[in-house]
């Protein structure tokens, strides 16, 4: 699943729209729309993202930025509790970064030669399919 934005758009504002599209398949039944945890880097530590995760009862594995920590401490007891961080889950966040690197290894995706969003999105799907098939054949040997 991909969400396209303008090239200069930041990732963080797309956090909630992407999360709304996630479907986690289980062994039986329909896919779940609420993952157990979401891992991300400090760019996703905004109050809005954290509040959305809390409201949906999703564990946030996102470290706090230094300025957010300082502001929270400055407020004292009114600043709330520090963010708890599961170190083992946090290590797994690089899975997405590795996938993005695999996508960008294909020159058409990395250089954005495609002029229209539809053709660029088609290239992303094609490259993702190639990665999936390659990984599938590697595991079935």
Image (cartoon, rainbow, N blue to C red):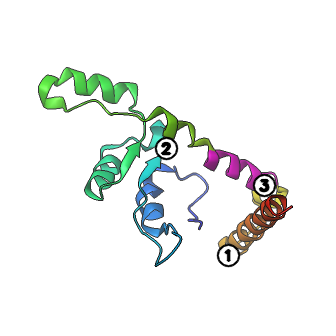
Residue 111, image quadrant:
bottom right
Could you say which is closer to the camera, residue 118 or residue 31?
31
Pointer 2 or 1: first along the chain: 2
* Spot occupied by residue 12 in the image (x, y as percentages of width and height): 46, 49
Q: Secondary structure at mark 2?
A: loop
Q: Quadrant of the N terminus?
A: bottom right
Residue at (24, 27) in percent of width and height: 72
Residue tagged 2: 40
Per the model, the C-alpha gap separating discs 3 and 2 is: 25 Å
* Spot occupied by residue 43 in the image (x, y as percentages of width and height): 47, 40
Residue tagged 1: 118
Is 84 drawn above or below residue 60 in the view shown? Answer: above
Is 93 drawn above or below residue 120 in the view shown? Answer: above
User: Mark 3 packing: few (<14 Cα in 10 Å), some, or many (20+)?
Assistant: few
Per the model, the C-alpha gap separating discs 1 and 3 is: 16 Å
Stretch in magenta: 95-105
Per the model, the C-alpha gap separating discs 2 and 1 is: 27 Å
Residue at (49, 43) in percent of width and height: 40
User: Mark 2 packing: few (<14 Cα in 10 Å), some, or many (20+)?
Assistant: many
Q: Secondary structure at mark 3?
A: helix
Q: Secondary structure at mark 1?
A: helix
* Spot occupied by residue 27 in the image (x, y as percentages of width and height): 53, 71
């Amino acid at each position: 699943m991909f969400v396209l934005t303008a090239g200069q758009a930041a990732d963080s504002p797309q956090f909630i729209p992407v999360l709304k599209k996630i479907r986690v398949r289980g062994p039986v039944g329909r896919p779940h729309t609420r993952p157990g945890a979401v891992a991300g880097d400090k760019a996703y530590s905004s109050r809005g993202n954290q509040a959305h995760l809390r409201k949906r009862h999703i564990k946030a594995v996102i470290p706090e930025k230094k300025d957010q920590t300082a502001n929270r401490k400055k407020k004292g007891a009114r600043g709330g509790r520090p963010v708890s961080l599961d170190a083992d889950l946090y290590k797994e966040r690089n899975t997405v970064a590795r996938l993005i690197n695999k996508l960008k290894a294909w020159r058409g995706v990395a250089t954005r030669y495609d002029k229209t969003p539809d053709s660029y999105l088609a290239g992303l799907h094609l490259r993702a399919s190639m990665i999936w098939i390659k990984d599938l054949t590697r595991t079935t040997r």
